[in-house]
Image: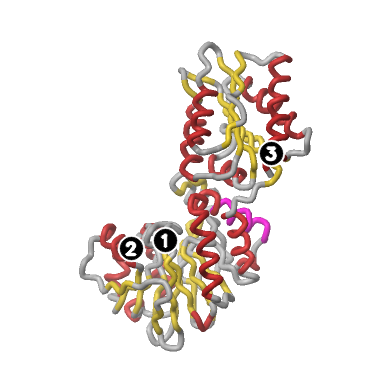
Amino acid sequence: MRTLVEVKKGINWVGAVDWTIRDFHGYSTNKGTTYNAFLVLDDKITLFDTVKKPLKNDLLHNIYKLIEPSKIDYLVVNHVEPDHSGSVAEMVDIIKPEKIFCSPKGKQALLDHYHREDWPYEVVGTGQEVSLGKRTVQFIETRMLHWPDSMMSYIKEDALLISSDGFGQHWATSERFNDQVDSWELMAHAKKYFANILLPYSQLIKKLIADVQKMDLKIDMIAPDHGLIWRDNPLQIVSAYDEWSKQVAKQKALIIFDTMWHSTEMMAKAIADGLVENGTSIKLMDLCADHRSDIITQLLDAKAVIIGSATLNNGMLPRMADMLCYMKGLRPVGKIGAAFGSYGWSGEAVKLITKSLEEMKIKVLSQGLSLQFVPDHEGLRKCVELGREIGKAIKEDL
Ligand code: FEO
């Protein structure tokens, strides 16, 4: 397996592949991930980013294939989240860099994480340039993409954008470039990553894309800190981010449900029947079978989100509470929605889901549909009718 790759002449990937990680604070990383780091061999030898702490030896091993780590002059910390900086303290002790470049918020975040006042911080802002010898690095602050400290590094002479979390994917592979893997699968990972990590910052992404367009940077390659490097047609991922950040919706409804004895499931299927009558595309997702992060990926381009739960102990089923908490944090916009569910004797779940949808500023189309115990033919007819109403509203709203 190739573990060392020349990205551009004199610029090498020296990161680590995390084949076995399966959870990234609530996101199902069922295909693993990578922590990309890049070593530039120039007059000033520069390491861009480190890796998660347990994989520090992978980083060191890759650097040793090229040089003694103590020969590194500069360290650039584009982002302080520990998946990229977890090994920074040990690396600084080994490298003893002349300078550590970071954003203003990056310096504070490094101090808050590693409590080292004595490091040679060099705070940089958007547009600031540093010469490495033959190459010039330009820094671009990208606050909240993904943390307040985040920034990107652009190597002018190579037209290479080292984009930190931006444009990444959680996908562990032996390949390093987008043209070496299946493009459909790659874009599916990139979409899931955007939906679950960057969705709340959609407005900032729109602004970043506009700002970078104004800077008129020539971009030949985009190297994120997770997943594959965009070597072939790198602007395809910028176009995708442009569309995803606008949360452009299709004539599509996402039905999410959790069921106790299959009655809420019967309702979900009947609502789906009503929706498909006018050509609405349906995704029906059962919380027993589908992970919250795969559901959110489907939400990205859905116009409607219809949520059903049975009532348990005067509340909703616990998996649904988890789902709604996760969804609320990701702040989807421009959706319409409704709640449904079966109950035995109290029936609070539908009211609680409706309240949660309203808190998310989702346009709620009805006060929700509750049916007692097992739906009869009349109950299912009401579900189909609700599906038809939502289908009509989707068409009107698009
Ligand atoms: Fe990949 Fe925000 O860390």
Where does residue 127 sit, x and y in percent of width and height? Answer: 43, 75
For label 2, count other residues whose C-alpha is less than 10 Å away and answer few (under 14), some (14-19) or many (20+). Answer: many
Upstream in the sequence, badge 3 or badge 2? 2
Upstream in the sequence, badge 2 or badge 1? 2
Name the kind of residue labelled 1 in the image. Answer: Arg
Q: Which mark is residue 105?
A: 2
Q: Nearer the viewer, residue 217 or 117?
A: 217
**Residue holding disc 1:** 143
Left or right, 382 with respect to 2, comes to right
Q: Residue at 41% across / 72% down in the picture?
A: 126
Above or below 11: residue 187: above
Residue 189 covered by magenta stretch: yes
**Residue holding disc 3:** 394
- Asked if marks 3 and 2 touch (Cβ < 8 Å), the reply is no
The local secondary structure at tag 1 comes to loop
**Quarter of the image where the N terminus is located:** bottom right
Q: Nearer the viewer, residue 31 or 366?
A: 366
| Mark pair 3, 2: CA separation | 42 Å
- Asked if marks 3 and 1 touch (Cβ < 8 Å), the reply is no
| Mark pair 2, 1: CA separation | 9 Å
Q: Residue at 41% across / 80% down in the picture?
A: 129
Name the kind of residue labelled 3 in the image. Answer: Ile
- Asked if marks 2 and 1 touch (Cβ < 8 Å), the reply is yes
Q: Which residues are magenta?
A: 183-193
| Disc 1 CB within 8 Å of nearest ligand 1 atom | no
